[in-house]
Amino acid sequence: MAAIQLQNYTLVITGAPYSSQAPQTALSFARSAIAAGHTLDRVFLYGDGVHLASAFSAPPSDETSWPAEWAIFLKDNDIPGVACVASALRRGLVNESEQKRYELPASNLLEPFVIAGLGEWVEGTMASSRVIYFHAGG
Amino acid sequence: MAAIQLQNYTLVITGAPYSSQAPQTALSFARSAIAAGHTLDRVFLYGDGVHLASAFSAPPSDETSWPAEWAIFLKDNDIPGVACVASALRRGLVNESEQKRYELPASNLLEPFVIAGLGEWVEGTMASSRVIYFHAGG
Amino acid sequence: MSTLIVIDQPPYGTWAGREALDMAFSLAAFDQPVALLFTGAGVNWLRKLQETSEVEQKSVEKNLSAAPIFGVEAMYADAAACVRYRLTLEDMVAGVVMSESSSDLLNQYKHTAFAG
Amino acid sequence: MSTLIVIDQPPYGTWAGREALDMAFSLAAFDQPVALLFTGAGVNWLRKLQETSEVEQKSVEKNLSAAPIFGVEAMYADAAACVRYRLTLEDMVAGVVMSESSSDLLNQYKHTAFAG
Amino acid sequence: MTPIHTLHILNKAPEHPRSVACMGALMPGDALLLTENAVLALAAQCSTLAGIRVYALAPDVAARGLGQCTGEAALVDYPAMVDLTAQAQNVISW
Amino acid sequence: MTPIHTLHILNKAPEHPRSVACMGALMPGDALLLTENAVLALAAQCSTLAGIRVYALAPDVAARGLGQCTGEAALVDYPAMVDLTAQAQNVISW
């Protein structure tokens, strides 16, 4: 079998946890990509996918916490996780600066996720050799 | 035309704002029901519909804030709005008691919405003469 | 008031069916008459030998097998959907009844709720 | 790298198409080549005279008409989907090109992103 | 006007599997109310439904630019939608 | 093994409109990877695809109890899914 060329991936997740399977499939994919020696340029959350960056998600203790698992994976591998600001604000996900701007009592963005514009996605598509989308199923 | 018998409605919303049209259709329906003299026993948010009770949702100023519009309607008409606790916790929506339990920095539940169990939905189905569901479209 | 909960989405890919099951169990817990109808791709909830550890979700097979014990009056599977997905009663969890006409079934219940 | 953004869901009922449009405009803003393909029920985004005040959403008709100005290279409509929804070029916003084969189109782009 | 047995509220585009199932479940004496994306059925070449009263929510029809092609369907506003749900013996949201 | 031109990743049940569109867009030299709910195509009576390599994600197949009916599809794990995306010239997620 021919050696596989190493790739630099951008992953885009548009499906929400506890609504779609996208965050699980994407995490299993991401772990395997890193294990095979590929790199992940960044992970971009878009649309309903921004709910994956919620610090307030509290699933039952016998269920996987997808936000927590993703946060650990991103930290351990020093991979940027970016939630789209327009998707996030509509859906009630704010970082500290948005919290102040909208005079909310707290931020609910889970570290190490950050909030930024679609330009981050554009940069990802330019910097990566592969862009893989994880949409909600159905 | 025959006079229409007055009904007591329970509305169940399972589609999220800024993802589905369900909260808008349901609010237009609810306003018209009240205007026609019907009563609303309660509004129950289930599944992705719980995002309608987010206090942190901050849509652009030229777009309708569905959480805010719903909150005003419920207050003005003294109608209970209940978000299912199991759906809410998974999706990162917490009231003050859950906030303390999970040691989170704040609650993000929008007043007058409350968080409670599916028993509230069961009670609604028993107390009402009509139960109308507003699901995500597609 | 009798309720029919309809699940027409397959398991694991979305949460809608799972949350609809909770609705059925909740009605049963309050001693309200309730039945489940699995139709379309939703009949795949009923297939035996679901091995879910690698997708890190709980299998619903056990819950479904326990549905009669919890007070769910009936679990119907749409016969045409079962043919499409090559499911026979033998392939499915115990206690399933084939429904030849889902529209007749919808007509028998006062209150119908679809999964998501 | 050329990108094709595919919108196959109708307007207003879901947000996926709207957010996919933002992706296209964002690529164009960064001077990246991008085109839009409307297919399936998504062709209904292109219909003229959308009057959205009563559903309290912004019409996308104006945005779409401005797509060429913003740098979107082409707006394709799947011809078979247009037939199904009885849409002709006259019924649609300006600047739409009919695509007889969406699979050929998919093959021409290095990078394809579906709405939601 | 004879009473409606079951009012079927459909909010999904004609291609959606639940939309297909809904069309197959309609019985004489029932009524169908198209809302949200389901109003696109007015534009699509769908088969007509004998013996079924068909309504479409006017704000959704207008939003999708379909004011000209309502065919056999009666346009209703939100108050009329409420009336339909009050009159029908059963209501199913698909 | 000839290289894959486009890898189509499909995660929707056979009834889903996007699933139908995906099946119609496959070209010789492409490969199809069934994930999540799309693995149900292995159980459904779907038409076979001449000239298209078909893969199915094993964890999703197992979750849905379909280990016995994989037919012509090759089962792959997550590492092999990564390999497929690395080998293919293009990847489309439906």
Image (cartoon, coloured by chain):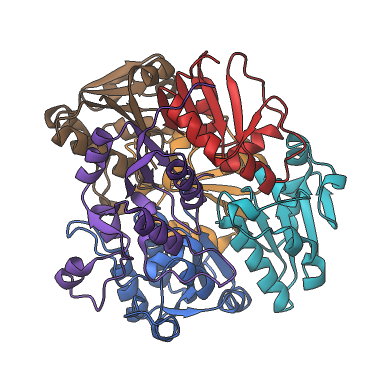
Chain colours: A purple, B blue, C cyan, D brown, E orange, F red
| Residue E52 image offset from top left, x and y in percent | 61, 42
Vertical side of B64 occupied by D71: above or below:
above
Vertical side of A122 occupied by B129: above or below:
below
Q: Is residue B110 left or right of residue A22?
A: left
Closer to us: E89 or A96: A96
Closer to us: A89 or E80: A89
Closer to us: F85 or D60: F85
Vertical side of B98 occupied by D69: above or below:
above
Question: Which quarter shows the C terminus of chain A?
Answer: top right
Residue placed at 48% from the left, 67% from the top? B90
Q: Is residue C22 left or right of residue D103?
A: right
Vertical side of B99 occupied by E60: above or below:
above
Question: Which quarter shows the N terminus of chain A?
Answer: top right
Residue E74 in view here: no
Residue farthest to the right, as pictured:
C90
| Residue D29 image offset from top left, x and y in percent | 14, 36
Residue placed at 41% from the left, 69% from the top? B92
Location of residue E5 by image quarter: bottom right
Location of residue A102 by image quarter: bottom left
